[in-house]
Amino acid sequence: MSTPGFVEPDVEAMSAALDAAAQQLDDQGGSLAWGVFRRGDPARTVNADVPYRIASMTKSFTAAAIGVLAADALDLDAPFSALLPEMAGTAIADRTCRQALTMSTGFTKDDPWADRMEAMTPAELTDWLHRGAIACAPADTGYEYSNLGYALLGMVAEAVTGRPFTELVAAEIVGPLTLTHTGFDHADFPDLAPGYRVDLGGGLHPAELTGPGVFSPIGGIISTVNDIGTWMGAHLDALERIDSYAPGSLSRILTDDQQPRRTMEIQTSDHHAESLSYGHGLETRLDTRFGRVVCHSGGYPGYGSHMRWFPDLGLSLVVLGNTTYYPAQRVVQDALDLGWAAATGQQGIRLERRTTSAPVPCYSAGRAQIDTVMAAANLVNDFDDTVAEEIFGVNVDLDEPRDERRERFARWRAEKQLDRPFAEADLEMVSPLRGVVTVPGTAEAKSTITVGLNHLGEVQAITLSS
């Protein structure tokens, strides 16, 4: 099945690339599951029935569940404070379900903090927001990936139905599609692929498993390659008969979720161009090589995932890995690039992508956020435990033990030959909760330290450029 003008990537080349990625992870001590599904052909799969956490791929299930409730009269444009009265007085009170679905609440990316919060209760999240959560931009002014919005979608679902969110997804989505190895509670999956954290030396350490809670709608689902193959197939089926569904049917909901709603970025290379948008719990693309593309990635402590399908080609792929933030999207993208090169007789070509992000108007950073970012960046120069205790969010030491972080900073400091503390002149605050410090004298090479803050202005990540 192929539309004239688009190229169907070579399956043999893609499979070889995925096998190579699986071998590389196996050599490291982890495991990879993958599947290539093409209409009319047998599936090609590895570890197809082994459960993995699928992380933020969960958002597609959450969006579908909200679609079911919208078909039953949930007002997607009602403010959260109307649906969740306990949100009154918080910074997110006037945002809506529709804005949360499309990543346009103006609350910024909250990985990796939110990835540690799955088991938080609704009452705890409510208390957290009442402490003074910080928005980065006005609503509906740009794409800002936010887990917080999807957590609130789960709270809305429970408030509207009186049922646990996990039960709602099971009854309305998982059950009807017969996804027999898909669920939220790791206790139900004794054969779950163990997740691992990778240390500085490449060693693996078991990652902590979390239980269902208020952040489960952002990334809590456990599933298999075969079940995700069915999930992707249901979306492909929905698009094939887009005009024949009754309003409110699951197929209509899955069709609506795949429509572009919020522009993300443009990617180009010497051989292609792609426009990226966000729909409802799914990323949508237009690719000059393949036509329509729908996808979503996932990253979690111990896991990384990516699913992608091509409505104009009848093709879908999924990759599930079991190390923290395993780069599954890159693995899928590389396999597709190699498959395209083989199909067009251009073996050996590598696509070097250039990215232009859609502009997002941000609020100005406050003095407290600037000071926190500067203090975090200067930990690279001189790690002070007292400072770390004051500014680190709860996830930071869980994500990387402090001794390892201290050693990583020391190695980078020596490599970059840092010889003085950073000053505000070295800092650019790209949003109220994200700052980039450029190492003096390396502006052209762009040696940088990026500090991300969570919604209360605590440090959630310190990222060093290579």
Image: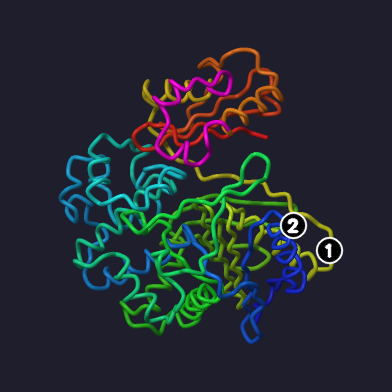
Left or right of 286? Residue 124 is left
Q: Residues within 10 Å of mark 1 (few under 14, many from 20)?
A: few
Question: Disc 1 on helix, strand or loop?
Answer: loop
x 78%, y 54%: residue: 350
* Disc 2 residue crowd, few under 14, some 14–19, many 20+, Cα 10 Å: few
Residue 13 is tagged as: none
Measured as percent of width and height from the top left, residue 388 is found at 45, 25
Magenta part of the chain: 379-403
Tell me the residue that label 1 is attached to: 346
Q: Is residue 126 magenta?
A: no
Residue 172 placement (x, y as % from top left): 32, 76
Q: Is residue 13 above or below residue 114?
A: below
Q: Position of residue 139 (x, y in %)?
A: 33, 45
Position of 350 with respect to 178 (left or right) is right
Image spot of residue 245 (x, y percent): 38, 83
Q: Is residue 389 magenta?
A: yes
Q: Look at mark 2 in the image and give the residue it sits on.
A: 271
Residue in the picture at 69% in, 49% down: 353
The mark lying in front, picked from 2 and 1, is: 1
Q: Which kind of residue does numbered mark 1 sit on?
A: Gln
Give the number of callouts.
2
Q: Are marks 2 and 1 in contact (CB under 8 Å)?
A: yes
**Quick one: quadrant of the N terminus?**
bottom right
Q: Eyeballing the image, is 317 above or below 120?
A: below
> Going 42% across and 37% down the picture, which residue do you hit?
361
The C terminus - image quarter = top right
